[in-house]
Amino acid sequence: MTPIERLSATIEQLSIKAKKMDAKNAHAKIHRLIENSNLFSGSLFVTQSDRFSPYIEEIEQKLPKLARLLSEKKEDLSLLLLEQTQHQIIAISNALHSNSTLHQAAKLSVDAHNKIKSNKAKLQNRYKKVAEKVLLNSHQLYQKLNEHHEFERRLMDMVTARESERQKSNAKNSAKLSAEVLALHQRLGRCRKAISIIERDIELAEKRN
């Protein structure tokens, strides 16, 4: 499965949850406390809504561009867009899990009608704080993952270069270069092991949230 296919599958599952949660919130009287308030900050989403589905749609619209960047091998741009998309997915997932808690908190203030506007702002801030906490942790992990992928790419380039030199060199230099290639492969193996560990940590972090 390609990265785009994995991302599409994740978004599809999230979309189903978002639609169910939007339907549930639409029938909940307490939802009026956050009605017409944005669930996420403008720095994370362009979308402005008190429903989850429009934010999913914003992510879905990025997939064709991401697929194009990947096919054109524009690594820096594709990694940047992919990281932004992953942050948005994590933020929505976390907010979905926090939906009941956030609405329950609002219920405590439902009798204070004159404070409804204040409560809307407080609820919106809680959504943002939850998202920001997850973003901080996930950002560090994804940044670490990106760094290791870049290290892996450089090591592979070095292996290719040394192997090319070895094939063109004499017997003495060939032995030396073979040793260097072996050492690079060992470093590459350790790097890939570290990547697997980071990916596992990301998966565990997302499950916890």
Image (cartoon, grey):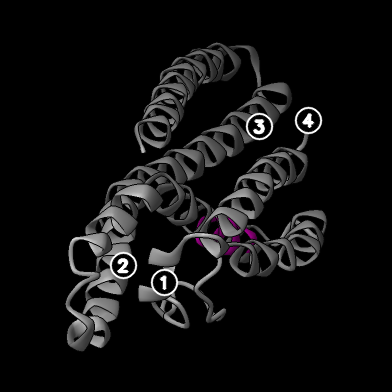
Q: Which mark is residue 160?
A: 3
Can you identify the residue that label 2 sits on? 128
Find the magenta span and give its range: 78-85
Assign a secondary structure to mark 4: loop
Q: Which mark is residue 40?
A: 1
81 within the magenta span: yes
Mark 3 or 2: the one toward you = 2
- Neighbour class for label 1 at 10 Å: few (<14), some, many (≥20)? many
- What is the tally of numbered marks visible in this picture? 4
Gap between marks 1 and 4 measured at Cα = 31 Å
Q: Which mark is residue 1?
A: 4
Amino acid on which disc 2 is placed: Lys
* Left or right of 158 on screen, residue 87: left
Gap between marks 3 and 2 measured at Cα = 46 Å
Q: Picture quarter containing residue 121? A: bottom left
Q: Earlier in the sequence, mark 3 or mark 4?
A: 4
Q: Residue at x 19, y 88 (%)?
A: 114
Q: Position of residue 36 (x, y in %)?
A: 47, 83
Is residue 34 visible in this depiction of the protein?
Answer: no
Q: Is residue 199 above or below residue 142?
A: above
Assign a secondary structure to mark 2: helix
25 within the magenta span: no
